[in-house]
Amino acid sequence: MKRIFEETYTLLVSIIGIIGGLIWAINDNWSFEPVILLSVSTIGLLCFLAIKVFGESVRPIVEVELQQTRSNRGPLMLAPGLSPQNSEGQYLHEENGLYHYEFEHTYDFVIRNNSINNAYDVNMYVENKYFLKFQNETSSLEPLTIDKPKIIKVKYNFGRNLTAKESLDEFSVKFNNDLKNTVFIIEYHDENRKKYYTKFNPPKTNTILKKEPKFDKSKYRLIS
């Protein structure tokens, strides 16, 4: 709102300067002083119009980060048809045998405004491909300011058939390929209700989009 008033003030000053300078110049036989006022006001108006037409307004910049907070590997479970068996069909525990493991990772989904301008009506979409649980909701009506990020708790559960060593390797990975390839779209507005978008891939890859992305909202779900 403050910027709107400042822009209106600049425009009015330039127009008044042009009109006043023109009247003054005509009445004063185009003397030096009114010509200067007229020239300066005209240049100011042209600069204002050029910025509005060709310049890019200062926009809010919303960026996201996924921060791991905890990991858990469940106990070894038999994988029917895959885990090693003896001749009598009894399952065996072998070092290199395949078994089923369940994993759970928890994260903080942190949404920040990295600009001096507030972002409004912030909505976040995520692909439906993976089993991500979002534990709390945020209100899209609450402005996103530079000093107050939004944080959503996330759980990611999945199972794998692995050897014991492979399960330890999997457990140590903070962001597996499934998660890294998940696409998030963040939609937000400036105070003039102009819409902007950021594309996010975990853990920290943000792409500030210059136009609305072509994404099928039926294949995404709304986080908030």
Image: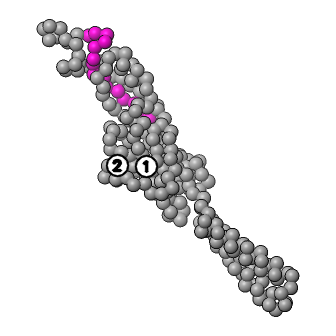
Q: Position of residue 72 (x, y in %)?
A: 38, 25
Q: Give the Cα separation between the discs numbered 2 and 1.
A: 9 Å
Q: Position of residue 218 (x, y in %)?
A: 31, 52
Q: Residue furthest bottom?
A: 27
Q: Secondary structure at mark 1?
A: strand
Residue 155 sits in quarter: top left
Graded by Cα atoms within 10 Å as few (under 14), some (14 to 19) or many (20 or more), the crowding at tag 2 reads some
The answer to whether mark 2 and mark 1 are in CB contact below 8 A is: yes
Graded by Cα atoms within 10 Å as few (under 14), some (14 to 19) or many (20 or more), the crowding at tag 1 reads many
Prevailing secondary structure class for the magenta stretch in the rendered image: strand
If you read the primary sequence from the N terminus, does the residue marked by circle 2 or circle 1 appear first?
1
Residue placed at 48% from the left, 37% from the top? 203
Residue placed at 74% from the left, 76% from the top? 41
- The correct choice, above or below, for 47 with respect to 127 in the image is below
Which residue is identified by label 1? 185
* Front residue of 32 and 11: 32
Query: In the rendered view, how is the structure colored?
Result: one colour
Q: Secondary structure at mark 2?
A: strand
Q: Position of residue 182 (x, y in %)?
A: 39, 40
Asked whether residue 100 appears in the rendered view, the answer is yes
Question: Could you tell me which quadrant the N terminus lies in?
Answer: bottom right
Relative horizontal placement of residue 54, taking residue 185 as reference (left or right) = right
The amino acid type found where label 1 is placed reads Ile
Q: What residue range appears in magenta?
A: 93-107
Which residue is identified by label 2? 220
Magenta stretch containing residue 95, yes or no? yes
The amino acid type found where label 2 is placed reads Tyr
Q: Position of residue 115 (x, y in %)?
A: 59, 51
- The correct choice, above or below, for 48 with respect to 157 in the image is below
Magenta stretch containing residue 137, yes or no? no
Relative horizontal placement of residue 180, taking residue 61 as reference (left or right) = left
Q: Residue furthest right?
A: 32
